[in-house]
Amino acid sequence: MNIIKSCIVLVALFTQFGWSLNTVAAQTTSDKRVSIASFEDKSGQLTANEALDQKYIPSNERPNAGLSKSALWLKIKIPPSQNNEKQYLTVWPPRLDNIELYRVMEPALAPDSSENTTQSAASFERIPIQSERKNFSFFSKFARLNNFELGNSDTPQVFLLKLKSDFALQAKLKIANADASVDGLLNQEFVLGGIILALIPLIFILLALSVHYKSNIYTSYFFTLSSTLILYLLIQGFNLSKILFGINVEIENQMIHLIVVNTLCSLLFISFGIEYLGISGKVLANGRKIMIVLFGLDFIGTFYDAVPALKFLAFTGLIFSFFYVYTLSVYIPQYRKSQLIVASIFISMSLMGIFAILNILGLSGIQSIDTQLFQLTRLVLVPFIFGTILWVLEKENEEKLIAISSEKTLQEKISTAEIQRRVLYENFITMLVHEIKTPLSTIQIASSSLKRHISENSPEQKRIDNISASTNEINQIFNKCLQVIDIENQTIAVDPIEFTLGMLVEDLKKSINSSLVDFEVSYNPRINTDYVILRTIILNLLTNAIKYAKEGSVIKFATHSMTSSTDANGRLLFKVTNQIGTVGSPDPERVFSRYYRSESAKQFAGSGLGLWLSQQLATYINSNINMLIQKDEISFQLELSLI
């Protein structure tokens, strides 16, 4: 339970700090001889004369009726003025704009009396409110103030103060002389300016982090801090809708809607923070979805009836806050010391949220605590939270750098190993081809020699022809393997030369069984390209067509001249066509893939490299091979520029 202990200590320090400031302020601005009693008017419609006759109970300077439609009447007895000084009553927070103050003329009822006494002869003087701040900071001309001049008197005075709020009915009363009142206002102005000037840079930094990293934790805290600042300004009497848009909307109505957004953003920030600590994201993600739906409905409800909607908001916030405190205290591994501070911050936020909600609800035992203490503590937490976010950012960057470094090291190792593997592979293939080609050449020479001494059409000649065909096929496979290595190493040298189409056709006829191919060549243009590459491509296409064509059919090799807007001399189209045999049509998407062979084509010998190799070689002569299937025929086409 180290996290809980750390959290309790942290909250205790913040609370003591805020309480100390609050105590000093109270001692300098309040007269302890003042007595206060309260009465809650459920109807909210009583007049001052009717309220005076009610039963009052002792109260203090921090009345709190919670979320209620009631009016709160306070009976205040002030002792005689010292040194004939004027007394002033300041009601905080300035957001309260439904305030009435009456001086009870005669007879005055002691405010600490709890007995019912009829005061039919009493008369009242309505004291005007001073809502404008004068001669203070730049912010003064935008913010309202609830200040009353009580005057001076050498006899005790009794006042009736009526408070009513559409939001939480919480207040803090300060009664002091003119000098102390001015000092208190100056202190408030100083604190207000400091908070605004401190938070705005943090908000812009968070905005930059949110845009750059697109992280939920930064975005949610950006909205949390922004809405907190706006909420604080509203509490201090800034009518932002009027200042920014010229629309006069009551401050408390603005707060009612903003508090829903602020609470949702705060809980989302805590949720994303908990998830960052490594706790199961599925439960938290589902919780966020439920939370967004509930708060969305509650936001709509605030436009119809604010008090029930805010009570629903309070209880929903309590449930999620307790859940987050439980989750943080149970599921964080104890040995992860680097996360203790982060967890403590989030637990502190959750606990402070719980106390603030209970205070807003006006819960007995908590309602007398100063609400400004919670605001102060929450603002004191801001730099700690911001520091936590920066720590998270630094941690993420550190992890990214480590990951990048590890990835780079791994890639270098893989690259080195791959290069070594490829060198071994190429050396092995080259050695293997060399060693096998020597006996193959011997077999070819021997078969050619034997063929000259055997009569034509004899069984022996057919066997020798089969031997020659097999050795030629093995030679072609080896040549393809060597070409694959050259392509992968990009070591193929392009050597363009000028030649005629007739020369190429004659060469092709000698290299294949010309009886199976119909060469349709009607003219003899001049070509300038790499002869070996072009011959290899067309020979591969012809060999492929002969292998997979319909049995007994003839392969067509044709050339056509084509006009071109980019080539002034036109282009030459090579076309190899065969009828589709028993293996069927190839897959158009995979036909030029390395090692591709359809299942039905595996009955024939082959490596699956021919078409892939031809397509790769075509790029070296600035061309491309296309496949066209029409009914029962398949064609492969290649275009070249003419001289």
Image (cartoon, rainbow, N blue to C red):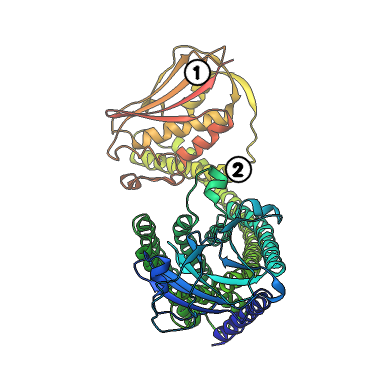
User: In the rendered view, would you say 554 is above or below 590?
Assistant: above
- Quarter of the figure that contains the C terminus: top right
Amino acid found under the numbered disc labelled 1: Leu
Q: Secondary structure at mark 2?
A: helix
**Upstream in the sequence, badge 1 or badge 2?**
2
Position of residue 179 relative to residue 442, above or below, is: below
Q: Nearer the viewer, residue 149 or 480?
A: 149
Q: Residue at x 46, y 76 (%)?
A: 38
Q: Position of residue 91 (x, y in %)?
A: 56, 66
For label 2, the residue is 486
Does residue 297 appear in the picture of this structure?
A: yes
Residue position marked by numbered label 1 in the rendering:
572
- Seen from the viewer's position, the closer of residues 175 and 243 is 175
Does residue 235 sit above or below 529 in this rendering?
A: below
Q: How far is the residue under mark 1 from the one under mark 2? A: 27 Å
**Residue 203, position as x, y percentages in the image:** 62, 56
